[in-house]
Every structure is written in C-alpha cells, then in structure tokens.
Image (cartoon, rainbow, N blue to C red):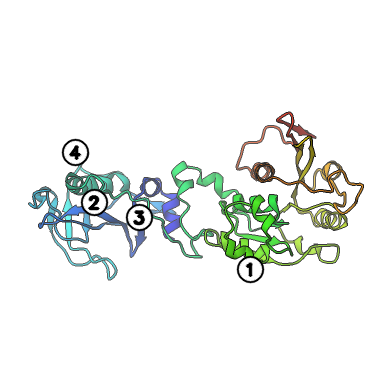
Amino acid sequence: MSARLIAHSPDLSRLRAEGYEIDVRDGHVVVTNVPYVTSERDIDRASVVVALTTSGDRTGSPPDHTVMWTGSMPCHQDGQAISRIHAGEIPPAAPGLATQHRFSSKPQPAGHYENYYDQITSYISIISHEAQALDPEATASTFAPIETSPEESVFVYEDSASSRAGIRMANDKLAIHTIAIVGLGGTGSYVLDLVAKTPVAEVHLYDDDTLLNHNAFRAPGAVPLDVLREQPLKVDYYAATYGEMHRGLLPHPIRLDESNADKLASMAFVFLCMDGGPDKLAIVGALEQAGVPFIDAGLGLYEKDASIGGILRVTLSTPENRAAARARMSFEDPDDDANEYVRNIQVADLNMLNAALAVERWKKYFGFYRDEEGELSSLFTVEANQLLNEDKP
C-alpha cells in the first residue's frame, strides 16, 4: 500500500524523487532523518509526521496546516527554541510513531497547504535551515535506498530512478508476468543486466553451462576470481548477482531442445541469445506454435588483418510476422566446419550493443518507447557503423 500510494501521488512521489526518506504507516505520512539543532547546539535527526488523507489510490489534501514531530524541540543555531512554529507537546500519534510536539506554521495568504509536498518541505526548511547554519552538509534529502517488501515491489529496493524521471506509467507497461532469456553468454547476460532494471514479475534463465574464465571477459560487471575458481553454473551466478536488486529471477540449469522446448509456452516474451543449430530450430518452432512473441539476437563476426568486422542482428517474431521473421534468423550449426563464423568471435562491447538493441525492441513492442518504424529486424554493420531496419510494414 505504501509504495503504491507514493507512486500514484504526485506530492509524495516528488518528495521521494528529491531524496526525502518518506514512508506511509499507521495512517500518517512520515519523513524521517530530518536534521535539527538541539538546545545543546548539537545536530540530531527526527521525523515530520502528518495525518494522511486519501482520494482513491492517491493522497487528498492535508487535513490541516499542522505537522507533528518525533524529536525534542528544534532550536535556532544558538540553542534557543524556534518558538514561531511550536503549538505544544502531544502524545504519540500512533504506537509506532513517538511524536512529541505539534507545529503550526500557517501559510499566507491561503492559510492552508494544497498538498503534502508543500506542507512537509515548508516545515523541513524552517527546521533544517538552522542545522545547516552549523553544518552545511546537514540535509533531509539523503537519497537513502528504501527497502521494499515482496508484496510491494519486484525490486529489493525502491525504483527511485523511474519516479525521479517521471516515467512510472511508461515503466508499468513492462510489468508483464513472465519472460525468459535462453542463453546467458555474452549477449544474454547483458540482456539480463538491462531487464533486471525493469518491473518484470519473473525472469526465467535457461542455460546449462558453467561460468568460465573466458565468459567473464564478455559479461557485465566484474566476476570475482574466487567465483571463477568455483565454476558455478551461469544461471545460479547471475540469479544470485541480480537477485540483489530484482526478485523473481528463476534459474533453470538445463539445455532446451526439441524434448523440452515446450517449457517456454507459458512465457509472455522470450529472448533467444543462443547459437544456431537444431536446438534453436526446435525452440523457434515451439514458440511459434505456442503463439509466444520473441526476439532472436545474433552476432556474425569475422577477423581479417587483425581487425574485427561483421554484423549484429535483432529479429522480432510475433504471431503476425512469423514467416518474415524466421527468414531473417540464422540456424547454422556453430559446430559445422563449413560455417564462416565457426570461431564464434564475441567481443563485450558488441555483445552489449546486441543486447541493448534487443531490449530496446522489446520495450518498443510493449509501448515503453515510441515506435514509428515497426521494424521486424535490425542489422548493425560494424565496418560502416550503420543500423538498417528491415521488413517494415
């Protein structure tokens, strides 16, 4: 309830975006960690508390112009009480809110505050101004991480980036129930890195390989040496790493092929980040039969005269364009000696770019980004630094 109310209330979300430690509990809006000067001229911290009124799934207008305070009486920098805001001592507002004082500072000429942002920041300014006179770094805008519960969010801590940028409504379009990433090599691991920053409910990870030394040089972040020595499964390592930020990462240490490709039938979307061959052909067929939209991301790189060239490709397959999409995919077996790309050259920056193009196309498909081209397939050529959209409507 707290996270949803803050997200849907412009005044509360603005407080969160500006770095205030805001919470909603026991029927009150609470901003903690506000600096103030004590009578001993020390700087302490306490909370501003205001009774909550709601209108649907957002805040209404504050009930009056007063606020409550959990600390001792705030003082000027010389230790004298700020008498112009004091309205008397009070009992605790609730069992979990040990308020001690009520403050009254009626705004002029209106005589009331229209929203919680104006009300709370007005009092914080009066109180913390004196603390800043003693310590310029004393501020209530701490930008502290806010831990969330599984009931509130798929994120372990509050997504302040979306609220700060004002894009929560666009971001909500990505909160589909389940997606899958098949293959956690160079491209797939970067897809996970980007998807983990979105509100997808569940991300299923499919790969049966172990994380080896060479993998670390085309993957996001820095894999610790001790981890490489342990040689964990890729799905376990990445689920644990990104599980520090995003809940609902489900590792599946199996290789998908014709016998089990139907495991993807319940997904809302799938990223294919795997080599060609019969297994990929079987997976594509299963996804097409199940009506699941998916993106196939691939690299075709070569080395000549000590320089790397080639093409990156991202293809979107939906129930409306199966034949055209399949025609753009590569099913060549990487173990085939006749394959021009048998060396399977991969470079971290091109893996990252391939993943970024794939995730960008996924976000377009679900309406997060505006889409005026409607491309089904995109090719990036390394030599020409050119991005070409194919199969436009």
Q: Does residue 56 sit above or below 263 in this rendering?
A: above
Q: Residues within 10 Å of mark 1 (few under 14, many from 20)?
A: few
Task: Determine which residue is flagged by label 2.
Answer: 64
Between the residue at mark 4 and the residue at mark 2, the CA separation in whole angstroms equals: 14 Å
Q: Which residue is mark 4?
A: 108
* Residue 126 percent across, percent down from the top left: 19, 46
Q: Secondary structure at mark 4?
A: loop
Mark 1 and mark 3: Cα distance apart in space:
42 Å
| Comparing labels 1 and 2, the label whose residue is closer to the camera | 1
The image shows residue 23, relative to residue 84, as above or below, that is below
Tell me the distance, in whole angstroms, between the alpha carbons under discs 1 and 4: 66 Å
Q: Given this view, does label 2 or label 3 mark the residue nearer the observer?
A: 3
The image quadrant where one finds the N terminus is: bottom left
The label number, if any, that marks residue 22 in the structure image: 3
**Residue appearing at x 45%, y 61% in the figure:** 148
- Please tell me which residue is depicted at 74% across the width and 50% down the height of the picture: 294
In whole angstroms, how far apart are the C-alphas of marks 2 and 3?
A: 19 Å
What residue is rendered at 74% in x and 52% in y?
273
First in sequence, mark 1 or 4: give its number: 4
Disc 2 or 3, which lies upstream in sequence?
Answer: 3
Which image quadrant for residue 73? bottom left
